């Protein structure tokens, strides 16, 4: 058994090497299924990196599904955690076609972080504390993913201590620290805000200097994202970061999803509001406008014409966004008449907006009687065979919207209209959508009526058979 495991290592069952996959399936997996911790303890206690890799993989796979162990086992397990974190021996395995060489501690640290927090916190705290301010990728992960997520007053000083030893260009570790402070803030344990402000200001200077020096576009993007993360976390932690935030907003020219969150921090700040409205008047980027509009909804109490700004820009730039729709719902900005007008006019973006809106607010199709009536009218309107779609502006697109919504919302009470559409429509794609709603959600009475119809209509029967075969190939999923 152990000699087989010595031949190769893979952390996943379906790795790229078939011979190693067999080792995983035949010698490793059965021991995991039997939850044979003692066997994996034995592997980890060897001095062979490959066996230790198998050993911790097995321990982690068992522990993530088992929280029942006695005190002696718990002590042994926690000692293994510390031994792993101190093990800098390298292992080798294949990731795709590439052979990977990595320290065992780096390879398994994420798996360690996934275990039950009450089991891993103390040994990880002991290990990070003993590192005496030295920080590497493993310690960065442990600070962010474990220690900062626990409401323990010992964590903030430990985190602050480790920030002192990060190099100017080590932005990966700085990202760990920023995320760790964000996680720590969720537990309400941030006390030394002045120290964090100084850290963030230093990071911003380092980022700006690096952006000015490097030419690689993708690396610059990563740094821009890191800079944006700092402003988000500063707002969440209620840090004194006003001057820096206003300067950042003044230079912002691209979409920024966290802008509404920052607006919540500065909702009573006149300078923030003025810069935001100025941005809205100067940009024509719909994605950036979407973020600005969502921020305006946050500031609405201090913006007199906020409703007009939002509605006018949505119409002008044809903005369809689920998050914005959710925020509009919170402010009751939309109404039934607005959706009715969108449905009647039937521009492509308006129909897409309606669909996104109904996915987020499915109850409105039942609660808005005038809109429901107009929606059913679309389902019940048909052109005669000698007429073109032009006779009924946007009817084809409206039909497609209505039938897709029946699928999205699983509207069993309206499926009867799908059968009429299948019978009367000539467009194959629309007929397929109508047919799919019947197959997927139709009750016995509708299915019986469709069966009778197909028995008397040979052409439709052939259409049904071809469509059914295509559904079987797709495991009954219809990708419209």
Image: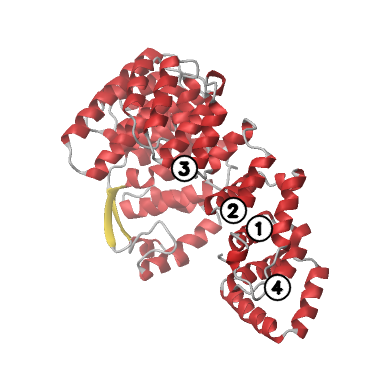
Quarter location, residue 4: bottom left
Give the residue drawn at x 30%, y 20%. Answer: 201
Q: Which of marks 4 and 2 is nearer the N terminus?
A: 2
Q: Mark 1 points at which residue?
A: 402
- Rounded to the nearest whole Å, what is the CA distance between mark 4 and mark 3? 36 Å
- Rounded to the nearest whole Å, what is the CA distance between mark 4 and mark 2? 21 Å
Point out which mark residue 317 bears. Answer: 3
Give the residue drawn at x 62%, y 33%. Answer: 333
**Is the C-beta separation of discs 4 and 2 under 8 Å?**
no
Q: Tell me residue 161's x, y (percent).
A: 33, 20
Q: Earlier in the sequence, mark 4 or mark 3?
A: 3
**Is the C-beta separation of discs 1 and 3 under 8 Å?**
no
| Foreground: disc 1 or disc 4 | 4
**In the rendered image of this protein, does residue 95 appear above or below residue 419?**
above
Q: Tell me residue 186's x, y (percent).
A: 51, 26
Q: Earlier in the sequence, mark 2 or mark 3?
A: 3
Q: Tell me residue 408's x, y (percent).
A: 64, 56
Q: Mark 3, residues whose alpha carbon is within 10 Å: few (<14), some, or many (≥20)?
A: some
Q: Nearer the viewer, residue 476 or 273?
A: 273
Q: SS at mark 2? A: loop
């Amino acid at each position: 058994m152990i000699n087989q495991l010595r031949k190769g290592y893979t952390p996943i069952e379906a790795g790229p090497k078939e011979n190693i996959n067999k080792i995983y399936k035949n010698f490793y997996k059965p021991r995991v299924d039997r939850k044979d911790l003692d066997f994996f303890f034995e592997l980890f206690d060897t001095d062979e990196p490959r066996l230790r890799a198998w050993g911790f993989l097995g321990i982690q796979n068992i522990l993530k599904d088992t929280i029942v162990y006695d005190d002696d086992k718990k002590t042994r397990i926690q000692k293994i955690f510390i031994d792993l974190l101190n093990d800098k021996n390298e292992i080798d395995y294949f990731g795709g076609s590439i052979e990977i060489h990595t320290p065992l501690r780096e390879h398994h640290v994420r798996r360690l972080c996934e275990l039950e927090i009450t089991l891993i916190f103390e040994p990880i705290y002991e290990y990070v504390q003993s590192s005496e301010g030295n920080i590497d990728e493993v310690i960065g992960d442990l600070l962010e993913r474990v220690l900062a997520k626990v409401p323990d007053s010992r964590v903030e000083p430990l985190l602050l201590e480790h920030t002192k030893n990060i190099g100017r260009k080590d932005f990966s570790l700085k990202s760990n620290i920023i995320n760790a402070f964000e996680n720590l803030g969720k537990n309400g344990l941030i006390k030394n805000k002045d120290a964090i402000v100084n850290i963030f200001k230093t990071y911003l200077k380092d980022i700006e200097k690096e952006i000015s020096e490097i030419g690689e576009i993708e690396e610059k993007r990563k740094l821009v994202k890191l800079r944006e993360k700092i402003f988000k976390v500063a707002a969440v932690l209620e840090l004194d970061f006003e001057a820096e935030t206003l300067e950042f907003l003044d230079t912002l020219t691209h979409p920024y999803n966290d802008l509404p969150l920052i607006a919540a921090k500065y909702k009573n700040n006149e300078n923030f509001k003025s810069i935001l409205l100025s941005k809205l008047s100067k940009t024509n980027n719909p994605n950036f406008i979407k973020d600005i509009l969502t921020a305006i909804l946050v500031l609405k109490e201090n913006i007199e014409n906020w409703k007009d700004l939002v509605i006018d820009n949505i119409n002008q730039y044809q903005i369809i966004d689920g998050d914005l729709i959710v925020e509009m719902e919170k402010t009751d900005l939309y109404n039934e008449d607005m959706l009715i007008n969108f449905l009647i006019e039937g521009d492509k973006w308006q129909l897409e907006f309606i669909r996104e809106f109904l996915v987020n607010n499915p109850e409105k199709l039942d609660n808005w009687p005038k809109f429901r009536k107009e929606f059913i009218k679309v389902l019940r309107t048909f052109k005669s065979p000698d007429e073109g779609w032009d006779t009924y502006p946007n009817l084809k697109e409206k039909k497609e919207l209505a039938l897709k919504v029946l699928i999205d919302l699983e509207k069993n009470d309206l499926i009867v209209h799908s059968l009429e559409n299948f019978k009367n429509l000539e467009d194959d794609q629309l007929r397929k959508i109508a047919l799919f709603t019947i197959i997927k959600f139709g009750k016995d009475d509708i299915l019986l009526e469709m069966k009778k119809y197909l028995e008397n209509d040979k052409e439709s029967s052939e259409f049904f058979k071809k469509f059914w075969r295509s559904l079987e190939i797709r495991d009954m999923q219809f990708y419209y």
